[in-house]
Image (cartoon, rainbow, N blue to C red):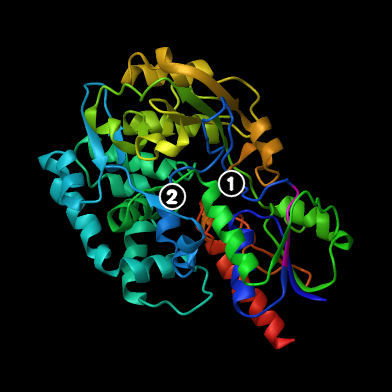
Amino acid sequence: MLDAVVVGAGPNGLTAAVELARRGLSVAVFEARDTVGGGASTEELTLPGFRHDPCSAAHPLGINSPAFRAMPLQRYGLEWLHPELPMAHPFPDGSAAVLARSVAETAASFGPRDAGTYRRLVTPFLPRWDALVRDFMALPLTALPRDPVTLARFGLVGLPPSTWLMRRFRDDKARALFAGLVAHAIAPLDGLATGALGLVFALAAHARGWPVARGGSQSISDALTAYLKDLGGAVHTGYEVKRLDDLPPARAYVFDTSPKALARIAGFGGYYDHFRYGASVFKLDYALDGPVPWTAKEARSAGTVQVGPGSRDIATALRAASREGRAPDKPFLITVQPSVVDPTRAPDGKHVFWAYGHVPSGWDGDLTDAVERQLERFAPGFRDRILARATAGPPELAARNANYVGGDIACGAVSGLQMLLRPKLSLSPYTTPHPAVFICSSASPPGPGVHGMSGHNAAKAVWRRIRAS
């Protein structure tokens, strides 16, 4: 009998398996697809030689993850590459606000009226960042806070809606960049604790940057897999699990799946019926005949570029997708251009680039024209550089990854109490009605992102249960 079986070989499932194997337990992972990776994978979606990330591409939470930082993943091929600028947010006049490694450079891009406000907002937390991120990403409490005072101060600033925090800024450059940071979680700007989302992304960039993984996000998953195998774990791909009886006997079963899939497989009936799935995205991957011709020079050297432009535009686009059930006419775009820093991603002189805009859950329309009109506003001539494109709306995203119900790449709405207490209102979110079954996907705290912390936290719960039995 195995000690633990993990279902799903995404970053959280692989992290959970590694954490258990490091404790000397026998572990096997079962993945329905033919390759590991889930939301951290890389494929030739357009043309030969162009390596695209179907989901996550830039990884501020990955490089800052306490779980990943405790593992020797660099020995297994993971190399973080840092663009000159972590992120840029261009405006129609050709200027841009930036999220730089330097707080001073970031603040200066907002203009003199908001520079001091930004410095006073983020500077107090940076010296205690490592303790703060560990405490923040371990909520609800899987361990006592390392720095409860800093965590409490952060909560006072971050728990209110981001719209409250943005009132501190006098000009829209700072408000727009911060609104864009919140939108990475596909969360309406006026939701509970959305201020914390924006702050975490900003602090992550100042602490360690917003890198891409050399060769693509698949290298994160491949490094976790190689490390797991060295620890004695096994990984089985092409193995679809439809019920618990499909799995070998084990003392614990850990699911890197959506709550909906877990309930179906484990026979939990309506246990997770109150879990809410959120809005989706419409994503385009491009093979380009050259770099994106951004008007703003800052955007040309940034790994991530937010295309809004203003805070009201961003709020309108998010509200349309999340609350009004329609695709926005002028979508807010999150874009990543890995090949500005990673030449392995495309043939010489060519580039890969992706962009997505927010759309309602399950939306089956085509946002391509609206996305490219937005890009042309800030990068005239963009369409002339397209060699090929691959599109994926909510149906395609859900077909590619069963965790993305309705195309929700966050694996559950990041809003209301569900932002902090997911997938159930419980202080033990990784446990289920079955004492031997656990959940470790992004539907559990701390939520979406390629950071492995949901798997790390779930593995602690599994370890405690096995040790007590």
Main SS of residues in magenta: strand
Residue 322 appearing in the image: yes
Residue type marked 1: Gly
At numbered mark 2, what does the secondary structure look like: helix, strand or loop?
loop
Q: Determine which residue is flagged by label 2.
A: 59
Tell me where residue 399 appears, x and y as whole percent. 71, 36
Q: Residue at x 24, y 26 (%)?
A: 296
Q: Residues within 10 Å of mark 1 (few under 14, many from 20)?
A: many
Q: Which mark is residue 311?
A: none
Asked if residue 296 lies left or right of residue 183, the reply is left
Residue 50 percent coordinates (x, y): 51, 30
Residue 78 in percent (x, y) is at 47, 55
Q: Is residue 422 visible?
A: no
Most distant residue in the bottom direction: 468
Give the residue drawn at x 53%, y 39%: 53
Residue lying at the far front in this picture: please name it. Answer: 348
Dividing the picture into quadrants, the one containing residue 268 is bottom right
Q: Earlier in the sequence, mark 2 or mark 1?
A: 1
- Along the viewing direction, whichever of 255 and 153 lies nearer the viewer: 255
Q: Residues within 10 Å of mark 2 (few under 14, many from 20)?
A: many
**Residue closest to the eye, 283 or 225:** 225
Judging from the image, what secondary structure is the residue with disc 1 in? loop
Residue 236 lies, with reference to residue 173, above or below; the image says: below
Q: Which residues are magenta?
A: 28-32
Question: Residue at image x 29%, y 31%?
Answer: 299
Q: Residue at x 37, y 17 (%)?
A: 376
Query: Looking at the rendered structure, which numbered label has been put on residue 39?
Result: 1
Tell which residue pokes out farthest to the right in this image: 245
**How far apart are labels 2 and 1 at the CA level?**
12 Å
